[in-house]
């Protein structure tokens, strides 16, 4: 299957909402269709491309802008880029979308209390104790997308359901070819979703 141009799919939402988990399942299914895929994890990118940045408003904007640059570079070379990064500020998400030919904003929506229950690293607890300043959702606001291209409600949907919605949207927008039909993906999700949740 030929793939002339990629796209950027940006999963935005609170820490613990399920952004990376959904991205991994989507990536697995796209790879099964022989498409070029890369996952850009916000935490990992910060460690390598933004070590000098802190967590102020300006630094967060710059961090997201750098991730966006890498995503755009990859997508221009035929890669479907799945970005899992909070990107808490609406303005920079809109800027990235306007500057990209193919950009899908996926709002991974999960209530704060659910995200805290899922937090195996204890980041929310540390933030509430003041050990992690400017933590999104605690002492720094997350600006909810006003009109995301897609919304996944991970407190109500399984990972398989959320990932299937993403794949269906990619087909509908012609970001991936029509022969990558979601029905095929749903069948394969029985194994993929279990693996992703472990």
Image (cartoon, rainbow, N blue to C red):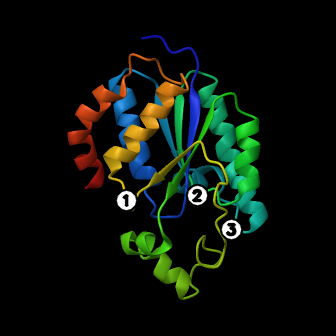
Kindly indicate the quadrant of the structure image that contains residue 69: top right
Residue that carries the numbered disc 1 in the rendered image: 156
Q: Position of residue 167 (x, y in %)?
A: 43, 33
Quadrant that contains the C terminus? bottom left
Q: Nearer the viewer, mark 2 or mark 1?
A: 1
Quadrant that contains the N terminus? top left
The tag earlier along the polypeptide, 2 or 1, is: 2
* Left/right of residue 29 with respect to residue 86 in the rendered view: left
Q: Nearer the viewer, mark 1 or mark 3?
A: 1
Q: Position of residue 54 (x, y in %)?
A: 69, 66
The tag earlier along the polypeptide, 3 or 2, is: 3
> Extreme bottom residue here?
129
Q: Which residue is at a point 68% across and 51% down the rendered structure image?
A: 64
Residue that carries the numbered disc 3 in the rendered image: 55
- The answer to whether 15 is drawn above or below residue 160 in the figure is below
Q: Which residue is at a point 50% across and 59% down the rendered structure image?
A: 109
Q: Which residue is at a point 74% across and 51% down the rendered structure image?
A: 92
Q: How far is mark 1 from mark 3, CA to CA?
A: 31 Å
Kindly indicate the quadrant of the structure image that contains residue 141: bottom right
Q: Position of residue 29 (x, y in %)?
A: 35, 32
* Left/right of residue 83 with respect to residue 73 in the rendered view: left
Residue that carries the numbered disc 2 in the rendered image: 86
The tag earlier along the polypeptide, 1 or 3, is: 3
- The answer to whether 83 is drawn above or below residue 32 in the figure is below
């Amino acid at each position: 299957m030929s793939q002339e141009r990629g796209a950027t799919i940006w999963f935005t939402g609170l820490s613990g909402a399920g952004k990376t988990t959904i991205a991994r399942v989507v990536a697995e299914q796209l790879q099964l269709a022989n498409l070029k895929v890369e996952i850009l994890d916000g935490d990992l990118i910060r460690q390598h491309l933004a070590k000098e940045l802190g967590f102020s408003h300006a630094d967060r904007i710059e961090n997201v802008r750098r991730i966006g640059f890498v995503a755009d570079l990859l997508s221009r070379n035929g890669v479907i880029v799945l970005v899992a990064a909070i990107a808490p500020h609406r303005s920079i998400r809109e800027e990235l979308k306007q500057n990209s030919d193919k950009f899908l904003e996926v709002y991974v929506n999960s209530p704060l209390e659910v995200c805290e229950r899922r937090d195996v690293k204890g980041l929310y607890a540390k933030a509430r104790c003041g050990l992690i300043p400017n933590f999104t959702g605690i002492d720094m606001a997350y600006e909810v997308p006003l009109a995301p291209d897609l919304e996944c409600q991970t407190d109500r949907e399984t990972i398989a359901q959320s990932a299937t919605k993403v794949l269906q949207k990619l087909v509908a927008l012609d970001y991936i070819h029509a022969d990558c039909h979601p029905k095929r993906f749903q069948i394969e999700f029985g194994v993929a979703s279990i693996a992703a949740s472990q």
